Amino acid sequence: MTIINHSESATQAPTEMLAADERLSTQEGRKDFWRATFSCWLGTTMEYADFALYGLAAGIIFGDVFFPNATPVVALISSFATYSVGFVARPIGALFFGWLGDRKGRKTVMVITITLMGASTTLIGLIPSYAAIGLWAPACLALLRFMQGLGAGAELSGGAVMLGEYAPAEKRGLVSSIIALGSNSGTLLASLVWLIVLQMDKQTLLDWGWRIPFLSSILIAAVALFIRRNMRETPVFERQKELLEQQRRQALEEGRKHIEEKDTRSFWKRTKAFWIMVGLRIGENGPSYLAQGFIIGYVAKVLMVDKSVPTMAVFIASLLGFLIIPLAGWLSDRFGRRITYRWFCILLVLYAFPAFMLLETREPIIVIGTIIVGMGLASLGIFGVQAAWGVELFGVTNRYTKMAVAKELGSIMSGGTAPLIASAMLSYTGHWWPIAAYFMFMAGIGLVTTFFAPETRGRDLNLPDDAI
């Protein structure tokens, strides 16, 4: 059993902390650290710009472009159905690229994923409309969403692993929160571009204006690719790469021995860290994609509030995220991952029903404030804690694979399907209260999971075993 609390971190992780201090004390080490940090931030910015662009487009414009003959609610469901396709692909990408990253290195995978995501997003901006090619238009959209999801499935976890393995143990929460800052930067960029594009008249927007945000993403991809090709592998992976194959062989041999000896450990104990990560992810990702995905479409398409109102809310929340995210990371370093995450989940549970009541007022200021609070809790604060906690939950042997697959499995069980399920609930019941209950339920899963999760603050990332 490996449970590390803050008071133990100074004695349990001296090797890693010394190595980190030695790296950062040299000019070359500092250069490697900042190059990796900027690369991870930019890559996550790319990923979340892609997903935020699509989420905003699905709620605001894709129904008219790709499903013009459907009613507003059905068009919203159809748009979010193609949105969910990307989440179906993410666990597949997480499994394959995570496996590759644990064997060939973090850098190799991060070069591949940024290329795949950049190409897919750019091509979405080149798809002809339904009026031009009929059903082939949404089919192409679904295919490119799938390709985008393959890369995104490994990008987020890869960035978290890379930053976690570079950071000094005592500041890992704060440094790892840069991943969440990248997601926030992507959302900010997407909302800013959409605010500009929405100034066009409706016909121009439908004809070609909506393509601008997707086509412009190639610029971010090009810069990120250049940086990643010139960055160094993480120190933890470099230190361990000569031992990894031996450790895997030993793990396989131990696994065979357990089978031969009729291992009596429960399935839960053997896979505890994995399922904890799944539960934590559901508690964050589901509410997050309802707050910044479904609610945007609900406000614009169902409540008929001006489209610039929810877009402005996303933009303001993203600006505030540059304060909220590092604060959440610092709090997790100061008080622990578990208690900080737990409080975010509690606040999300309390937020659900009042949020939809306030949205029903249709008052722009109230709507903007409600969306900002939801994103501040679900898409920014809790995510800022999750990055370091996820890295620390797993041992070095298969960290990338386990973390990526657990995160994406949790994602497809929550965020990937949440907007679609919420839209279906709205269509079936005609009321918002089942959606609020659904929001509360997913946040509740995250809350309950924190009572089973170990405190990992300060854990040595060179340890081969999971923190259970």
Image (tube, rainbow, N blue to C red):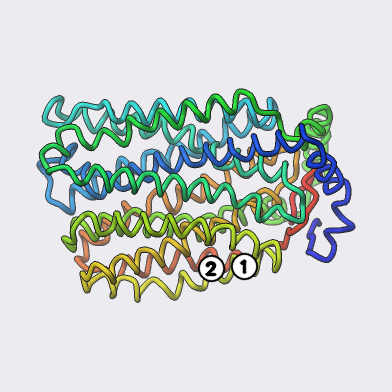
Direction from residue 152 to residue 372 in the image, left or right: left
Between 179 and 138, the one nearer to me in the picture: 179
Residue 334 point in image, percent of width and height = 71, 66
Residue 135 picture quarter: top left
Q: Amino acid at mark 1?
A: Thr
Direction from residue 277 to residue 195 in the image, left or right: left
Residue 77 point in image, percent of width and height = 24, 49
Q: Residues within 10 Å of mark 1 (few under 14, many from 20)?
A: many
Q: Residue at x 71, y 56 (%)?
A: 269
Quadrant of the image containing the C terminus: bottom right
Q: Residue at x 28, y 34 (%)?
A: 212
Report the Cα–Cα distance between label 2 and label 1.
Answer: 7 Å
Mark drawn on residue 340: 1
Q: Residue at x 59, y 28 (%)?
A: 228
Between 24 and 154, the one nearer to me in the picture: 24
Q: Which residue is mark 2?
A: 344
Q: Amino acid at mark 2?
A: Phe
Q: Which element is circle 1 on?
A: helix
Q: Residue at x 47, y 32 (%)?
A: 150
- The answer to whether the residues at label 2 and label 1 have Cβ atoms under 8 Å apart is yes
Q: Residues within 10 Å of mark 2 (few under 14, many from 20)?
A: many
Q: Which element is circle 2 on?
A: helix
Residue 337 point in image, percent of width and height = 66, 62
Between 135 and 236, the one nearer to me in the picture: 236
Direction from residue 390 to residue 83 in the image, left or right: left
Mark drawn on residue 83: none
